[in-house]
Amino acid sequence: MTLKLDFSAARITGLVLAKVGNPSRDEPLQTSKQVFHVDDADQPTLSAIFTRPFRSLPGQRFHHHTALEKHEVNSCAAAIFGSDDALLSSGIEIAERLYAKSSHPNIKSGDLCISLVEGIDADGETKRAICILKSESVTPFLSISTRDGDLQLATEHGINPEKIDKGCLILDHFPHKGYYVLTFDRAGSESRFWVRDFLSVQPISDAALLSKRVAEMAVAAVTSTVPETSDAASDDEDSPPWNSNLAAREALSYFDGKKTFSMQEFEEQALRTPEARRAFAEERKRIEEEEGVKLDDSFDISKRDVTKAKKLMKSVMRLDTGVEIRLKPKVVDKPDSVLEKGYDESRGMKYIKVYFHKDLA
């Protein structure tokens, strides 16, 4: 199930700090010698910084291939939730595990904060959580201060709260099922060590996740198997390619007006070609094996997450020349702000011009 979390009354009761290097580069691990307690005046600011990244993430849980009791971070979390006195020793254990998993040459060293947070509202119940944040870069900033009756400017370096690289929130909920875990990694799929190697978590297979994944898989399956006579090549100038994927719209129309999903019915009504059914089956097998998500043959449909998949469909421009352009959500509803369509008479082809300030690749 997906929990609705409210962090407005959250409060940090203690912090364990660490500097985590990369063992392959002979960089050390340095950890706190005592628990750091946050001053009351700093509580609102720090609590907001620590919890902000977790406001809209899907629920996951700790997983171990043999027994949950052998999962190191899960065991550390259980110890901390069992006794506040375990925050220092178990926090250091978490830092040591991260250090042991950080030997790949591409893994950056960084600052680690492990905190115990109380006062989180989860569907009307007050819960505690363990927050783990890692920052892999420092940001220079300027500080103006008063000294000897005059103003002075100093340059300092610190953690930018808006650029924390990795994070994990372990809620004291479902302890016998691997807790309710939220996690993020700004490096995305390019860096799997945080989610897979260090945390070892799996998505919670609820209606929201299943609806979202099946809808996305359906769009991918039907659009990858339709003939390359793209709508983008149409003479209809009022039908732009990011809105004209008829096959994908027909596949997602299956969810309209339904409360319960049926895999057999879905394959018959939404995946109308053998190629689409084959592509869907291959992607289903990959997700179940690689991500540990069991896609049930029947589940309650989450209308909100199907709507998200429909918006994703609109964000992909698939052209008959084999080119795909993906648009961010803020661009989907006003593509003309960064895109310009035209026609090249010498080539006898349409074109799309893209405007941008800088390359972020």
Image (tube, grey):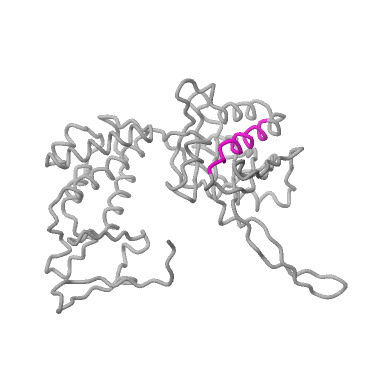
Height in image: 177 above or below 326?
Answer: above
Question: Which residue is more in the foreground, 197 or 86?
Answer: 197
Range of the magenta residues?
90-104
Q: Within the image, what quadrant is residue 112 found in?
A: top right
| Quadrant (top left/top right/bottom left/bottom right) for the C terminus | bottom left
Residue 2 in percent (x, y) is at 43, 37
Instruction: Please report the residue visible at 47 percent of the width from the left and 34 percent of the height from the top.
Output: 201
> In this picture, is 345 found above or below 327?
below
Residue 130: which quarter of the image? top right
What x and y, as percent, mark residue 51?
A: 57, 47
> Looking at the magenta stretch, what is its main secondary structure?
helix
Q: Where is residue 128 in the image (x, y as percent from the top left)?
A: 60, 35
Q: For this rendering, which residue is in front, 341 or 12?
A: 341
Residue 225: x %, y % from top left: 16, 47
User: Where, quadrant-wise, is the N terminus in this rendering?
Assistant: top left
255 and 353: which is toward the camera? 353
**What residue do we see at 16% from left, 72% from top?**
349
- Say which quarter of the image contains residue 269: top left
x 76%, y 38%: residue: 33
